[in-house]
Structures are given as structure tokens and as C-alpha cells.
Amino acid sequence: MRALRIIVIVLVTATASAVHLAAAEATATPTFRSLTSANTGLDHIASLTITVPSTVVDGDVLLLLFESSNAADPTGLGAWTKIDSGDAGSSLRGQSFYRIANHEPASYTLTYSTAIHINAVMMDYSGVDTTSPISAHGVVSLDSYVQTIASPSMTGVGPNDLSIIAYHARGVPVGVWTFTPPSGWIERIQGTTNSPNNPDVGSSIVEKVGAGGSPSETTSIQVTYVTTALALRASADSAPVARLAVSPTSGQAPLPVTADASTSTDTDATPIATYTFDFGDGSAVVGPQASSSAQHTYSSAGTYTVKVTVADTGGLASNTTTQVQANPAPTNLVGNPGFETNTSGWSPLGQGVTLTRSTGGHSGSWCGQLLNTGSSSVTAELNDNSNWVTTTAPGTYTVSAWVRSASSSNSQLTLKLQEFSGTKRIGIAQSKVTLSSSWKQISLTYVASTPSKSTLDLDLFVQRLAGGSSFFVDDVSITLG
Ligand SMILES: [Ca+2]
Ligand SMILES: [Ca+2]
Ligand SMILES: [Ca+2]
């Protein structure tokens, strides 16, 4: 019979490993973070303030274990859930409370109706099932003076649960009072009120993973006691909660974006291990990686679904998605923006002014050159002929060009856009730039006053361009947005 049982256990273990990788890591148990303690010291005092452990984060479970030198309840614990309370006669009450941490205050204050001795401990645990944190509990008490303190037996303690016993006691005033914890248990704290001339209260608190029986403690002096015991239920291993923000969410392609999954959470004993990003445009998946962010550039327009998969150390994963809109570059309404093959669509204006192509350009191999072939200054002008925008449309026109002079000069170039209804000018926008031998961008925006009933005339000109001088134009664009 015993041999058969061993075989069954082995099979179950093997199956679990096969279906759930890293099963050993996924075994969660409540974990002690830290504690705080407070007591009334030498005096009898009606209230006691205890600081919340600084390690606490929302979702932790806080325990408050305390004893008082009377059989009364304090006020101030409305936010807490009582686990157990027990009395040794009318001169000792030991109690256990818990609370799931949520925006904790700096401290809690226990207030009694009379001045008494109080000793309290607050403990902070992570990895506790917050739905049903207490898997077992119990209390025993004795109103006789003894040196061995019993503890209650608990049923229903899971193998990964954490058993915690608080031995609350009240001693006689005869010298040093210490507790001797049971072997195999971790003692987190022991302490008594410091009152040599009065009977003190004090406690020893121990913990152990799994069911630990009902061990007793011994004390150096005789005491009456109330022992509260409880077990913190181990949290089930949960997958992370994946969260994703992509910035920007839209823009003109090529569109660089940053995907940020840093607000993803996994507060159980198997925290987040890796992030994997799929940008949804057929590019290689990024990760799995430890970093919670990744960058990508969408080269072409489209609507893309970005997905992040967040995995924990236990092998559980979840994902979430968000969308990015990469917009196409607006159409350039200028049919010959760069002078790469000819000067068609453009005409020079001005006495003796010529338009030719010149090697070198802002982009490509060529640009347009306006040259004053005469000997005296003239206004040299580059005009679209015929107009690139023959019929206006609603929206905002953005006009841009790159310009330079042959050598450094103080000449000013004007970009001018005029709206005509027939031969009548009904609108104008201008922008000016001082030319230099380096390429400069000049631009303006314009909204047609009578869309669909007008045309736009584009000019780039330099007034008083000296004889023999020239200026250069390239990459002219008119876009409608
Ligand atoms: Ca987890
Ligand atoms: Ca060009
Ligand atoms: Ca024109």
C-alpha cells in the first residue's frame, strides 16, 4: 500500500513538470517583508500608535498582533478584519487582525477607554492570496501561571501557506522575561512592555511554511497566555497583467514609435520576467527581453496592431494590443519639384533672366538656376507655368522650397503664393529668407478663400538681382492637408 502511494506521487510530479515549465519557480509562498512594533513601555497609556511597515505595497497582507493588560477592545481598527481574540481572565487579551494593504496611512492608533499596557506588532507579507488570505486560524488561552505556552492546532494549512503563531502573555514581575521559540520555527520578534514594577504584557511571534503542528514555547518567568495562530494562504500563481502604450499613436511614415509596457504588473511570487514586442508590420519580433520598452520605425503607411506579451518567472504570460496609424506622406502637387530631367512646368520672369538646370541640388543631382544674364539689376523670378494648383480645394496648403545663392550674399528671396479668381487676385501669402551659399528652406501656408473657384500662382523671386548673379531652387513642394 505504501509502495503504491509513492508511485502515484512520482507520476503526478512528472505530469506537472511536463505541462508547466519552471514549476519549481512557480511555487509561491507568502514572504515576510518587514515588521514594526510599539508598546506602552513603563507607563499605562490609553492609546498606542504603530507605524505601518515602510516596505508595504498595495496587495500585501498586513497582520496586526497585539495584547493588552485588560480584556477590552480598542477603537481605531475599523479598516482591519479580526481573525481571533482571546482572554486570560480579565487581565490579558490577545488579538490578531489582518488587512489587505491599499493606500496605507503612515500609522494606525489603538485607543482604549482606560490606561493600560499594550504591546503590538505589525507585519508585512507579500505573496498572499488576497481573495482569501487566511487559510486557518485558532486561539487558545490559559488564566493560570505557567512557563509553557501552548498553541492551537490548525487544520486546512496548505503546503505553501505560512503558519504564524503569536504567543501573547502576561508575566509576573520577577526578573528578565524572555521566550524560547520552538525549534524549526523562525522567530520574527519577541518583546515585552518595560514595566518592572507591574505585571507586563509581551509576545513572541514565530512562522513556518506549511502546517507546523501546535508547538509550545517556554518562558523564563511564569505567565498567563493567549496564543493566536493563523496561516496565510499562498497566492495562486497568476499571469502578469499586460499594459501597453505606444507613442506617438499616429504620424507620417516613416514613423518612429516607442512601445512602453512598463505599467504591466504581476504582484505575486512569480513576477514579470520578460517582454516581447510584435509591431505588426511583419518585422522581426523584439524579445523576449528584460526591458519593458522597445523602439520601431514604420516605413510605410498603414494601420498596425502592436502586441506585447508579458511573461512571468513561472512561465505564465498574457498580452495586450494597441494600434498605430502611419499616415502616407502628402502628395506633392508640384509636378517637377527637383529639376532632375528638365525645367518643364517652370518659367523665368525678368529682363535677361534665364532658367537652366545646374548640377548639384538640395536632393538629387540637379536644381534650377535663375541667372541674370544682363549687366544691371533686375527682379528675377521663378514662376510655375502653368500653375501647379489649377483649381483650389478646401484645406491648408503648405508650400516649401530649398534655395541658395551662388556665393554669400545679403539678397533676400521671397516665396509668394497668390490666389486668383480669373484674373482677379483674391489672396496672397509671402515668406522671405536671406540667401546664402548653403541651402535654406523657405515655406508658407495658405488656405484658399474660394476653394474650387480659384487657382494658385507660385513665385520665387529676388529683387535687384545683380547682373551675372544667380540663385538656385530645388525640392519645391505644395501639399494639401
Ligand atoms: Ca506571476
Ligand atoms: Ca533636385
Ligand atoms: Ca504661375
Image (spheres, rainbow, N blue to C red):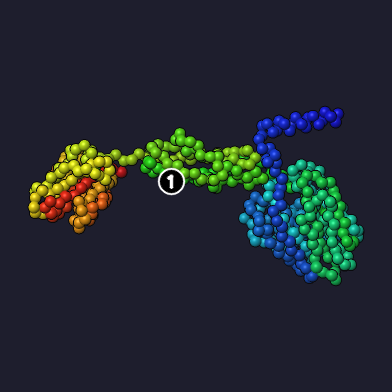
Q: Is residue 56 left or right of residue 396?
A: right
> Could you tell me the amino acid type at mark 1?
Pro
Q: Is residue 256 left or right of residue 7?
A: left
Where is residue 429? Give x, y as percent: 22, 51
**What residue do we see at 73% from left, 65% from top?**
48
Residue 172 visible to the viewer: yes
Q: Nearer the viewer, residue 274 or 39?
A: 274
Please give the residue where the numbered disc 1 appears in the rendered image: 248
Q: Does residue 336 lie above or below 400 as drawn?
A: above
Q: Nearer the viewer, residue 217 or 404?
A: 404
Q: Nearer the viewer, residue 324 or 419?
A: 324
**What residue do we see at 87% from left, 59% from top?**
219
Q: Does residue 285 lie above or below 60 as drawn?
A: above
**What residue do we see at 76% from left, 67% from top?**
40
Tell me the quarter of the picture where residue 360 sits.
top left
Could you tell me which secondary element the residue under label 1 belongs to? loop
Q: Is mark 1 within 8 Å of ligand 2?
A: no
